[in-house]
Amino acid sequence: MLWVGFGGLLAIILFMAWMGARVVSAIELEDRELRVAYQQRDDLLDEIRFSLVESGSDIRDYLLDRDRSAVAQRRADLERLHSRITGAVASYGRNLPRDEAGPWGQLTRDIDAYWAVLQPSLRWDRETRRQRAEDVLDQQVIPRQGELIRLDSAVASVNQRNLQRSNQRIVDLFSQFRTEMTASAAVALLLGMLLAFLTIGRILILERASVAQLREVTRARFEMQNLSHRLVAAQEEERRRVARELHDEVGQAISAVLVELGRLENRLPPEPRENRSVLAMARQMAERAVVQVRDMALLLRPSMLDDLGLVPALKWQAREVSRRTGVKVKVAAETVADDLPDDFRTCIYRIVQEAVNNAARHAHATSVRVEARQEDRQIRVSVQDDGGGFDPSLDKGMGILGMEERVKKLGGVFRIDSEKGGGTVVSLLLPLAASAAREGS
């Protein structure tokens, strides 16, 4: 709708501009042609007028002059004037306006009659010219010449009126053009207002839908974050419970089995030795089971994290990883207090655990450095390895997402800096002020 509306409005504006330029060009061209035609006709009338006046002087000099050479010159001048007047009359009559036909026809006939009177006198001899000169001048030339000049002035007046009508036509054309442009502008304005109202209405509808959708997305994201936090908390609680069950129930049961096997071993006679061999094998299996159950319980939730604090748990984890994988893990966390809140201890321990295990299993690192530094209102933790590295923007598994969720839950900042062949640094910053606020609430 917007494309069609704005496209139509733009098309109307372009059409108005094109039509305006076209009409203005046509008016200017017509005005220029009219003025050129008027000027040409006016020049022709001036030429006829001046030629007639000049012809009057020449015919008078011709009739009254006694010098033969001068008479011949006068006759040639009159012939030249006749040709010039005839040419001007013919040129003027080619594009003759309709309302000039009457005056122009009368002027043409009088010019022809005027030259018809003059033509016989051009063949007179000197004696005839002397006898008839005054009569011709007084009765024919001067009256006819005055009439011709009066008719020429009448034609010029008609030509002037034509110019005025042409100017009025140009004014009318401009007025019509102004009216059309005003109407087109009004149509464009109405369409623009309609389009603006429709657009504003559509935008308001989309805005309300967008706000509602944003609220829904925000609510869904908040619910998902709460669900993720509850899942993490439930997972940690389940690990704590399973670790306790393994330690208290399964571990104690296997330890009891070991005690009973010891009592049984004391009651068996020395012979046969096969019985003691089977009993020793069962005792070894039970001892290995006790060790495995203890390791599983410690991996799920080391009791020292609750009993001794974060730093001993991190150092125990470093020793266990080094023992199992051969990777040298060094922990530097002397400035971390022992009274950290439980959620902070758990978050840091799990992130360090995940980062160290990733460095050993996936990055094939040979050494890992874990550094934790507690400051006034925050605690910084970093895990740096010398492994093969990876692209954090592409390789983002569930372990990294879990670490991010744990840090976000505590209002911290989580970051991974890594590149191919350059090792990896996992760092997090937790604000201790947030923990104090939660405890206060």
Image (tube, grey):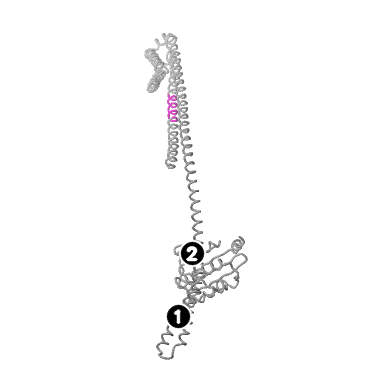
Q: Which residue is mark 1?
A: 286
Query: What's the CA distance linking mark 2 and mark 1?
Result: 36 Å
In the depicted structure, whether residue 230 falls above or below residue 44: below
- Counting labels gives 2
Helix, strand or loop at disc 2? helix
Q: Which residue is mark 2?
A: 402
- Type of residue at label 2? Gly
Q: Position of residue 272 (x, y in %)?
A: 40, 90
Q: Position of residue 179 (x, y in %)?
A: 47, 29
Asked if residue 196 is among those painted magenta in the image, a careful observer would answer no
Provide the major secondary structure of the magenta segment: helix
Q: Quadrant of the N terminus?
A: top left
Question: What is the number of the mark on residue 397?
Answer: none
Q: Which one is in front, 13 or 90?
A: 13
- Type of residue at label 1? Ala
In the depicted structure, whether residue 231 falls above or below residue 44: below
Q: Which one is in front, 321 or 25?
A: 321
Give the magenta part as a residue range: 27-40
Pointer 1: residues within 10 angstroms few (<14), some, or many (20+)?
A: some
**Front of the two marks 2 and 1:** 1
Pointer 2: residues within 10 angstroms few (<14), some, or many (20+)?
A: some
Q: Quadrant of the C terminus?
A: bottom right
Q: Position of residue 108 (x, y in %)?
A: 39, 16
Q: Quadrant of residue 71?
A: top left
Helix, strand or loop at disc 1? helix
Q: Residue furthest bottom?
A: 271
Q: Residue at x 59, y 61 (%)?
A: 438
Q: Position of residue 362 (x, y in %)?
A: 44, 70
Asked if residue 29 is among those painted magenta in the image, a careful observer would answer yes
Relative placement, left or right, of 27 versus 428 is left
Which badge, 2 or 1, comes first in the chain's sequence? 1
